[in-house]
Image (cartoon, rainbow, N blue to C red):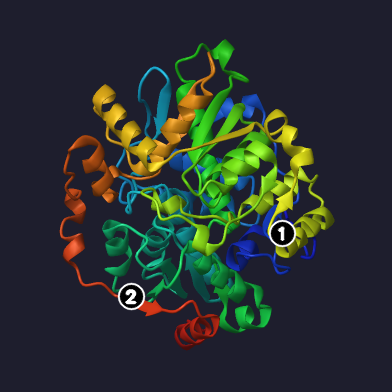
Amino acid sequence: MKYISTRGGMEPAEYGEVLLEGLATDGGLVVPETVPQVTSETIESWRDLSYPELAAEVLSLYAHDIPRADLDAMCARAYSRDTFVADEVVPVTKLDDEITLVGLSEGPTLAFKDMAMQFLGQSLEYVLARTDRTLNIVGATSGDTGSAAEYALRGKDGIAVFMLSPQGRMSDFQRAQMYSLDDENIHNIALEGVFDDCQNLVKALSGDLEFKRENHLGTVNSINLGRISAQMVYYFWAWLRVTDALPVTERAGFEVSFTVPSGNFGNILSGHMAKTMGLPVRKLVLAANENNVLDQFFRTGLYAPRSSAETYLTSSPSMDISKASNLERFIYDLLGRDGERLSAAWRELDETGKIDLTAEHARLEGEFGFVSGTSTHADRVATIRATFEGTGVIIDPHTADGVKVAREHLEPGVPMLVLETAKPEKFPEIVFEATGKQLGMPEHLSGLLDLPQHVTEMADDEAQLREFVAARAVKP
């Protein structure tokens, strides 16, 4: 298994190599040359595996250059009881007669990003040790990616993290999780602007190959293929758990649908890849908030990202993104995995501010199974309230976006699984507004908001960021 660029200008590379690179060398995104296929029999053979064991099986199809014994050990460490609270790592629970929740927030930062980031932390340290290299992560976060990356990489040998976040656009909890870390290899930067401004600076530094090589830059944003591949695992896990109760004769090919709250398109892209591998998925339902560029794309075929000034500050802040980096990987598939057509589409985006794929619109649902919807603050409040009153379960605002949109796409006989995004304790204001419940801090995080915070405020200035990174980068 080798990896290539969506834009066709990168020599095929191994899994371990692309983990360190993040972006492809030609500015595109890394994708497998071919997506591995699994049969119903293979998936069924995974039914009795633990989550770490399943992760090793799925990832072994992508990480051919990592010995299987080493991969098994990495997955066991990444998904251990020392890291995840739930015995099963990912609990799958019926919320009501229509919706099943896939619990992805049992990790150290109480958010789904831990699911991929814990594996990435293990695999990056492994590859660096094997190659005697260092890595300086430059990343952007709208809320949960930053803390998940920092908790996974804090204290790791040969790794430093430079995490950009938008000033004033995360919850107090999210800021405290990131900024309270005092490890020497963690550097938090609060940027003037929105998430897209942070992401643009990360791409600018990663796209400068001379600066990237000189300072050994990499990324753990969802553009990193290691995260995409690790996230595929819980789609297989959730399907296996939902079909556990079915007679053996009815399991093969039994379709379920997944609803995924979406910002940067990485989480739902992993579902698309799992479906492409052979997992029986009927619909992939994309749930957007008021920053609904992706909803508009899947409804019309027109992709028109908004400017920073047009990006709303919402009560589901991790989805306050208007330009979804991972959409490039899906459009590559939509355009027949043709690097020239993909590059032409991105030139169109640069020149006109949009990509017109309306001619492909019917294929988005018909061939690929994508549908979508938008949720507002009022929808989130109503959904959190109704869910609590009907089931006693409190959900976070991003998951509420998912539940609201999921109910618009229910089909008889097709289970609807909503991927949970985070614990509601991370967003106490909207939970209180919806339910009147004042959520306390989880016991193991008590006192977090009172800890000293370590952060550098910075203008939206590429030169200033370059200087900051170069002065603190870990060198071999």
Q: Position of residue 157 (x, y in %)?
A: 43, 73
Q: Position of residue 152 (x, y in %)?
A: 40, 61
| Pointer 1 residue | 349
Q: Furthest-front residue in view?
A: 310
Helix, strand or loop at mark 2: loop
Question: Disc 2 versus disc 1: distance between alpha carbons?
Answer: 34 Å
**At 35% across and 42% down in the image, what residue appears?**
397
Q: Callout 1 environment at 10 Å: few (<14), some (14 to 19), or many (20+)? A: some
316 sits to left or right of 182: right
Sequence-wise, which precedes: disc 2 or disc 1?
A: 1
| Pointer 2 residue | 455
Residue 396 versus residue 446 in the image, above or below: above
Amino acid type, callout 1: Leu
Residue 54 versus residue 291 in the image, above or below: above
Q: Callout 2 environment at 10 Å: few (<14), some (14 to 19), or many (20+)? A: some
**At 32% across and 37% down in the image, what residue appears?**
381
Q: Position of residue 429 (x, y in %)?
A: 24, 48
Helix, strand or loop at mark 1: helix
Amino acid type, callout 2: Val
**At 33% across and 54% down in the image, what residue appears?**
109
Using the image as rendered, state which of residue 91 and residue 132 is in the foreground: 91
- Label drawn at residue 294: none
Residue 369 versus residue 120 in the image, above or below: above
Asked if residue 371 can be seen in this view, the reply is yes
Using the image as rendered, state which of residue 195 and residue 453 is in the foreground: 195
